[in-house]
Image: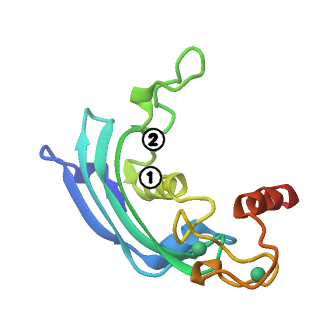
Amino acid sequence: MRVHLDEIGPDGFDLDEPVTKEWLQATLGPGTPFRSVKDGHLSAHLERLDEHVVHARGRIALELSADCSRCLGETTLGLNTRFQVTLFPAGKEPPPGPDGEIDPDDMGISTYADKEVDLSQIVNDEVFLQLPMNPLCSESCAGLCPNCGKNLNEGACQCAPRADLRWEALRQLKVD
Ligand SMILES: [Zn+2]
Ligand SMILES: [Zn+2]
């Protein structure tokens, strides 16, 4: 995922390579609910805006699995995202606006060092921006019965009286 500045010619530079599942798992770090099950893909087109400034746009496609945070069932999660970023040599990036706010036009700003653009940082950022904190097998997942542990997606359990699920969600919030 590294491109040396000298490789970016007048027509730019096209990068097309796998995001290995080993790299992805290491990036997700310990304690992540996600498992990297297969290689993803990164494609990007890089252009030099001037001698030092590089513009990169591309697409990241990844597939991960995780345990649903409600029912603990295995679920597959696809991430397919486009990115655009302007890269400046480290230390030469434009300063934030006067009020410390980042101009929306400057959202995609990053830096590189030693004349080498490393897109792995961008993949890393996108992964953490796009992945949900609490993965769900479906938005309407009914979860597990807090009494008997039955997966309520497979039907109601015998616990009586049945607590209202919305109530139950509130109660769990307080306990957490
Ligand atoms: Zn679920
Ligand atoms: Zn139950």
Q: Quadrant of residue 105?
A: top left
Foreground of the two, 28 or 45? 28
Residue lying furthest right: 175
Q: Inspect the image, locate mark 2, and give the three-letter code of the amino acid beneath it.
A: Ser
For the residues marked 1 and 2, what is the alpha-carbon distance in whole angstroms? 8 Å
Foreground of the two, 70 or 105? 70
- Lower position in the chain sequence, tag 1 or tag 2: 2
Q: Quadrant of residue 52?
A: top left
Q: Inspect the image, locate mark 1, and give the three-letter code of the amino acid beneath it.
A: Ile
Ligand 2 in which quarter:
bottom right
**141 sits to left or right of 103:** right
Picture quarter with the C terminus: bottom right
Residue at 12% over, 46% down: 11
**20 sits to left or right of 161:** left
Residue at 57% over, 72% down: 26
Which mark is on residue 158? none
Element type at marker 2?
strand
**69 sits to left or right of 61:** right
Q: Residues within 10 Å of mark 1 (few under 14, many from 20)?
A: some
Residue 29, percent from left and from top: 63, 69
Residue 144, percent from left and from top: 70, 77
Residue 48, percent from left and from top: 24, 39
Q: Which residue is mark 1?
A: 122
Circles 1 and 2 in contact, beta carbons < 8 Å: yes
Residue 23, percent from left and from top: 49, 73
Q: Which residue is mark 2?
A: 110
